[in-house]
Amino acid sequence: MGVFASYTLRSLRKNRTRTVVTVIGVILSTALLTGVVATATSVAAALLGRTIETEGSWQVYDSLQPAEADSALGRLATETNVATAMDSQVAGFASYASDADLSTTLLAIQTAPRVLRGGADQARSLTVMPTVRSGREPEAPGEVMLPVTFSGVTLADDGSGASAASDGPIELGSTVTLPLGATLGDGDSLGTPTTTRSFTVVGFYVPQHFLRNDFTAFEEAGATAIVSPNDVSNPVFTRVWVSTSGLSTRDALKGWAAPIFGEEDYYLHGQLLALQGMASDESTVMESLSGMVAVIGGVIVVAAIGMIGNSFSISVAERTRQFGLLSSLGASKRQLRRTVLLEAVAIGVVGIPVGLAAGLAGVAAMLSSSARAFDAMFRSSLSGTAQGIPLVISPAVVAGMAAASFLVLLASAWAPAWRASRVSAIDAIRQQQDIRLSKRTERAIEKAQATGKAPRAPLLERIAGLPGLLASRNLSRSSSRGRTVVVSLALSVVLIVLSGAISLYMGRAMDVGSDLGAVGRSDISLTIYNRQEADQGTVSKATLGLVRDVQGISGQVDGLTSSSAIVNGALEVTLPAGSVSADGRAFLADYYAGDSGAAENGSYAGPMLVSFVDDNTWAELCKEAGAGSATTTDGTSMPALALNVLAWMESNSVRTVAPYGTPTTATVYELSDAQSTLLLDSNGGALVQTWENSDGGASGSQRQTSIDDAAVDSGTITFVGTLDSLPDQLANTGLTSSSILPVIMPRSALEARPNLFSATSIVVPFSLAEGADPFDAGNALEAAADATVSDNATAYVNNNVAQNEMTEAIVGLFKLLVTIFSVVCLLIAVANVFNTLSTSIILRTREFAVLQSVGLGPKGFRRMLVAECASYALRGLGIGLVFSVGVVWLFWTALSSSVGLSFELPWGYVAGAVTGVVAVLGLSVAYALRRSHALNIVEALRADAI
């Protein structure tokens, strides 16, 4: 070991406190940098896995025409860059008429997947494959699988010449006749089929419609019939999905794909490519993630360089006399620089490996403890046993983090090492290089000399006497160290207050919307939509029948108890003058841009949303509104309650508005065309507006007729009261989050006059028994509903308990990440303050010895140091609190742009920041005083103590 290496290690041992603090700083900065990168790589891997799961692993997709299909498919089977490939032959398109909606619809016909390259499971993961609801996929020629929406539907010939038909209501085993070979032209016109074949229905699947990401989806057709592989001899075109290997950039991928598929005649999976590290204009996910890592990493690097560099500056200042002696004995500038850099290497050998291990262990613990939150983010759902995401980081990335931390360490030590090599031997031995007056002090001295008047005594001298004067003089000649302490304290304050603001505002944001009904107040709710298309009366009666169908669902699921079902629908009404308020007219005008249906006098013509409740609920709501519980049995005059609250999204913020004035009565109409709507004419009367299709539905025009010509039936509604907030019983209906005036009526009105209303859905609230698992109960309810409702209805479960847990988990994860980052940055700042303050005081032991020798006692020492620390504390707190207010305001502004929140500082955290600053300064001074008092005055005067 060389003499300089031995000297460096001895110096580290003699100054254990500074060495330990510096090593801790290296560990913290390395751990934080590693943690940020490891979290980012793990999240990126989870995003990639989620994208493959929901969109498929294909990188290139194309629709091959018959003339190019054989050549392209042959090359895909042999190309070395092809990892996995799959194709499906499209046999053509068909139209059909059905008894479900009596309208003509397009049906695509394609084969089940055929593997071109790779294993079967890998190939099927290239795209989103259909989920079989019942039966199975087609395997033999002459078999077909249809969307589940075709179950129970009869297909009939529509006379197009390329029509699909069935032998009756479609079920497993039914026969369906499909035309093959018909192409699709402009305006959805069908070509002539080459043949017609009969197929046996062997299964039903759930359609998803993700276009190129979905095996069954077409932009042109609304549904797809899947036949067995190799069951098409002359396809109209072939769909192909491919993933590659050995191509690392988007340009390389495009260069490979162009000769096979044609120049730009294909689609790239931009989202997947971005997550795989290939540049993509179609997705900014990885750019955002990389940018976030870069910003946070930059903050960490700056903080680390400031703290570690300050530590090395102090180390050099401690040993300037030794450096001067070495220089006078012949040590070169390079050898002096190497001495300091060798110290950095020795600290890094200990601190960097520990920091890497601590960072990886911390991320692993965070990912494990936040499994539910990550499940909520990446799967949009939670299961009873959340899996979370694994820690994913490669050895190359770990090595990169070690190298980056080492470079940060060398960068921190380089400037102090350069300064050590530039100090002259004479100045170093005299220790005069650190005695520099500030520009302000120099100007004050020059002014005093010029005017002959002594400058005004410093504030600290006026407060603390001679000790205050000494403190003021030391602050003026050690301004660079003082700035380091002040900046570190200010940073600590900002981080503490920002953590408090995040906790405060994110907690409040979780509660926003509950008063507007945006968050369901029942534990779990079941919504069933009636998909039947017919006249209003028929649809409304069928929806009332769904209420009876779901009565027994509650008893099928353990842990759930149902409340009364609510029927939702719409109606077309006219309201007299004074019914709509000024705020209501402004609200409607904002949404409908001139066609609001509301006049200046408060009259209205147009749609309204309605919720029909059972008699008991109706009586409770009438009592809440202070009205009599009038009911109707014959439908001659039907009672209603006006729900006088709506959520208005205005300028990216949400506020409530009371849309009603003083409504008394309304006239409700049944129109001859269910797609028509009412609107006001120029004279304040009502017109009926109808959309007329032309050119096969490709275009159309609006036609207006008088209400007398278009109305089939009408009735009278009497408003018996008004509710100014959404009742708990209707929290799951979404009445207040629409752009249409809401109203509540008894279900008996719907039963008496179903033709006046378009009732299309029901909502059944459920309460969860104590101790029951919300995820298991929600899944069981969904299965029971699917098995109970008819084929013309679709059931959805809104698991409010699980959703709230997901929200809390995500917000909790966000708070955890911010807290971890803030705490580690705070520790770095605290280490910086402690190291700077305590060591700078210790460096003045020779000065303290002189002061002690001339009679300054322990009390004077304490007053001097307290005065200095008070100056640091006031400046650090002042700057930190000012910046904290600005940072909190920016955070509040960003959050309140979408959620209305009042501005407030987290005063508890502000108090904590003040207490923390005082505590850090107190501990630093106490430690420094203990070290200083332990020194021998003679040794201190000889400058041999350090």
Image: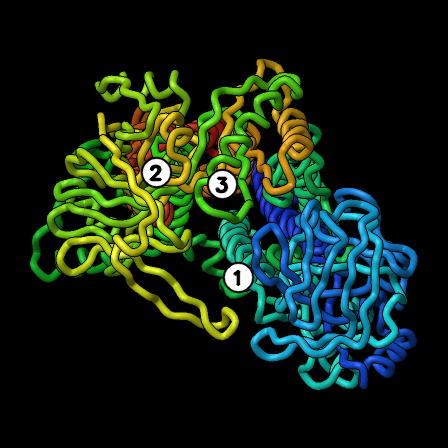
> How far is the residue under mark 3 from the one under mark 2?
27 Å
- Mark 1 against mark 3, which lies toward the viewer? 3
Residue 483's spot in the image, x, y percent?
Answer: 36, 50
Sequence-wise, the earlier of marks 1 and 3 is 1
Q: Relative to residue 10, is residue 770 depicted above or below?
A: above
What is the three-letter code of the residue carrying label 3?
Answer: Thr
Image colouring: rainbow
Disc 1 crowd rating (10 Å Cα; few below 14, some 14-19, many 20+) is: some
Q: Secondary structure at mark 2?
A: helix
* Residue at the image position 66 percent from the left and 42 percent from the top: 359
The picture quadrant where one finds residue 907 is top left
Q: Which residue is mark 2?
A: 736
> How far is the residue under mark 1 from the one under mark 3?
85 Å
Residue 496 seen in render: no
The picture quadrant where one finds residue 908 is top left
**Marks 3 and 1: in contact by CB < 8 Å?**
no
Q: Nearer the viewer, residue 180 or 64?
A: 180
Q: Nearer the viewer, residue 361 or 85?
A: 85
Disc 2 crowd rating (10 Å Cα; few below 14, some 14-19, many 20+) is: many
Residue 305's spot in the image, x, y percent?
Answer: 53, 54
What is the number of the mark on residue 505?
A: none
